[in-house]
Amino acid sequence: MKWLKLALSAAILAAAGIAIRYVCYRPVRCHDLTTRVAMQMKDMDQWGDPTRVTVATRENLARLEPCRREMPWNVNLQMLVAANYGAREMHEDAIRVYEDALRYDHRPELYFNLGIERLKTGRVDEAIEPLAVACSIRTDLITEILNIDVRARVMKLIDQRATLLRLPNEPR
């Protein structure tokens, strides 16, 4: 009986240790990793060496993907993974990650980045909708759309939606 109590106590302690590791350690580790990679991504713009950027983004993705799969609700992590895919010219993967992130949050940055990635793949018609959503929430994003024709289409869609939302007796 004494050995049974001892074995049961050991099992409880082991389970508690595993729970603490999964509940506390992994999110902290992933948060630390996310912070370090985000700082590195800011520096990448000034590197100027595409080979160095490719190697860094490959390493970033190898480290970030397990965290993303463990914590899919972490939208900042999702955006960082998608940005690394975009930096590697893997736009379809970036689109997939942005679409996954939209299941958890509806930030204008997610819609905007999704639209930009779709533009990079040549799917202009599919890019207009998320760009319009993002720019109707955050109007400052419209200036970041470099293609003038796309910008005009986005602004036209935003205007059409604004007209539909007005009350009949509201001045135009």
Image (cartoon, rainbow, N blue to C red):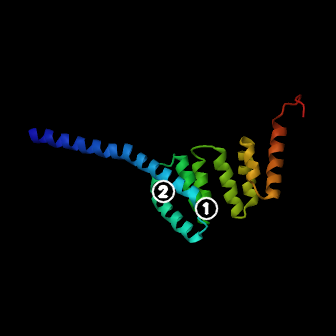
Residue at position x 75%, y 59% from top? 124
Residue at position x 72%, y 41% from top? 137
Tag 1: residue type? Gln
Furthest-left residue in view?
2
Q: Is residue 74 left or right of residue 86?
A: left
Vertical placement of 121 versus 172: above or below?
Answer: below
Other-residue count near label 2 (Cα within 10 Å), few / some / many at <14 / 14–19 / ≥20? many
Image quadrant occupied by the N terminus: top left
Residue at position x 61%, y 62% from top? 46
Q: Is residue 122 left or right of residue 26?
A: right
- Which numbered disc flags the more N-terminal residue, 1 or 2? 1
Residue at position x 80%, y 42% from top? 161
Query: Which residue carries the number 1 mark?
Result: 46
Is any part of residue 82 visible from this angle?
A: no
Q: Nearer the viewer, residue 166 or 155?
A: 155
Dividing the picture into quadrants, the one containing residue 3 is top left
Is any part of residue 26 visible from this angle?
A: yes
Q: Do the residues bearing badges 1 and 2 touch, measured as CB atoms within 8 Å? A: no
Marks counted in the figure total: 2
Image quadrant occupied by the C terminus: top right
Q: Is residue 96 left or right of residue 151?
A: left
Question: Element type at marker 1?
Answer: loop
Furthest-top residue in view?
169
Tag 2: residue type? Leu
Question: Element type at marker 2?
Answer: helix
Locate residue 129, reporting x and y percent.
Answer: 74, 50
Query: Which residue carries the number 2 mark?
Result: 64
Locate residue 86, reporting x and y percent.
Answer: 61, 61
Other-residue count near label 1 (Cα within 10 Å), few / some / many at <14 / 14–19 / ≥20? few
Dividing the picture into quadrants, the one containing residue 147 is bottom right
